[in-house]
Image (spheres, rainbow, N blue to C red):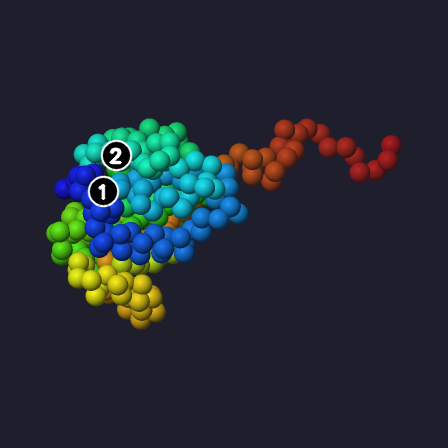
Amino acid sequence: MHLDVVDLRNFYYRTQLGRAAQRAVRDRVLGLWPAGQAEMTGLTVVGFGFAVPLLRPYLEHARRVIGLMPAEQGVMPWPTGLPNVSVLCDEVRWPLETGMADRIVMLHGLETSDNASALMAEAWRVLGPGGRALFIVPNRAGLWAPREGTPFGCGRPYTLGQLDAQARAAGFVPERHAAALYIPPSHRRFWLRSAPMWERMGQQVSGFLAAGVVMLEVSKQLHAPRRGGLGEAVRRPLRVLEGQPRPSAKPA
């Protein structure tokens, strides 16, 4: 089940709960991937699904920022007031060259995909060797997954183990995991005002049990192929001389 871009925009930009969720998830992403000049200069950052609320901090220092939105979801211009970088695309055929991305952030993409394995494979293709991807999905054991009134209540929620297994099957190497969104999914003013406290407490105490989303950071590692020919040549470098008469050990 795909989400509609209008509903996503209204949730994240026009509701207090959505803005609180955006801030909680974005702060956690920045904790993993700082947006400073030293970390982002020269890098291409790609977001897929509806990841643009998380990408704004990278606009200043990254070489290029691209927001990919699947056709089933729809697309909106982003960022406001700046040249548009959002693109409508097929979810399993991205309009990007192989190995082009240094960082990929996926939010509201994997859990709503009709073919999650093919989507993972496409992300692997676009990510460059040594690059990093961050998959953010609703936590099956969290408070947000059962709430259909938010984007985190749509699609298939994951456990960390399920996300890890799917990433490995696509060829990624899991590096580290995290969680965010500990605030209860309520529009009540008390919960919204106390959101920063819930995030701090959740990171210290609750682990993954109460988190609204789980995050898995992965890398793309390519190993050089092993070829027997060169090793054989080194082990027997003078094979071409086999069968030839050997010089006498005694002087003439």
Q: Nearer the viewer, residue 124 or 8?
A: 8
Query: Mark 1: which amino acid?
Result: Arg
**Disc 2, SS:** loop
Q: Are marks 2 and 1 in contact (CB under 8 Å)?
A: yes
Answer with the quarter of the image where residue 131 lies: top left
Note whether residue 83 is visible: yes
Q: What residue appears at the point 17 percent right and 51 percent down from the top-left corner?
A: 150
Answer with the quarter of the image where residue 25 lies: bottom left
Q: What residue appears at the point 37 percent right and 34 percent down from the top-left corner?
A: 82
**Disc 1, SS:** helix
Mark 2 sits on what residue? 76
Q: What residue appears at the point 22 percent right and 47 percent down from the top-left corner?
A: 14
Q: Nearer the viewer, residue 36 or 214?
A: 36
Q: Position of residue 221 (x, y in %)?
A: 43, 44
User: Which of the two labelled residues, at mark 2 and mark 1, occupies the earlier sequence position?
Assistant: 1
Q: What residue appears at the point 19 percent right and 39 percent down from the top-left corner?
A: 6
Image mark for residue 9: 1
Q: Nearer the viewer, residue 178 or 75?
A: 75
The answer for how far apart the CA atoms under marks 2 and 1 are is 8 Å
Q: Position of residue 32 (x, y in %)?
A: 41, 54
